[in-house]
Image (cartoon, rainbow, N blue to C red):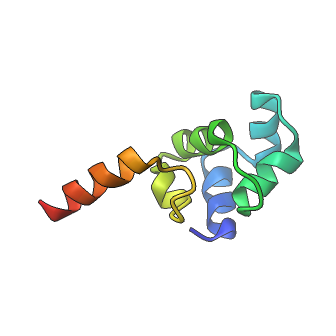
Amino acid sequence: MHHADIIAAMVKAGWPSAKVAKHLKVSRGLVSKVIHGKATSRPVATFIARKTGRAISELFPNGRYTSRLNKRFDSRRAAS
């Protein structure tokens, strides 16, 4: 998903990046970097996914937050 779409989903859900950062006690810069794909943080990405009601793989489809085990499970699910 494009970073602008992630930001829009967060705002729509009532969780702008500054609020996410404050809640997780991380910098706004880290939240921004995760959204833009410049840094990884599973806790930040998972929190954003939960608050927006979207799957982490939908928000970050490049596989950055998907373990090899999950990829194997997803491929089996798609095949059936």
Task: State the quadrant of the N terminus.
Answer: bottom right
Looking at the image, residue 46 lies above or below residue 73? above
Frontmost residue, 44 versus 4: 44
Looking at the image, residue 24 lies above or below residue 73? above
Looking at the image, residue 23 lies above or below residue 55? above
Identified at 80% across, 54% down, the residue is 32
Q: Is residue 65 left or right of residue 7?
A: left
Task: State the quadrant of the C terminus.
Answer: bottom left
Identified at 56% across, 59% down, the residue is 60
Q: Is residue 35 left or right of residue 57?
A: right
Q: Quadrant of residue 75?
A: bottom left
Identified at 88% across, 49% down, the residue is 29
- Residue 40 in the image: state x and y as whole percent: 70, 50
Q: Is residue 62 left or right of residue 68?
A: right
Identified at 88% across, 40% down, the residue is 27
Q: Quadrant of residue 37?
A: bottom right
- Residue 33 in the image: state x and y as whole percent: 79, 56
- Residue 61 in the image: state x and y as whole percent: 51, 64
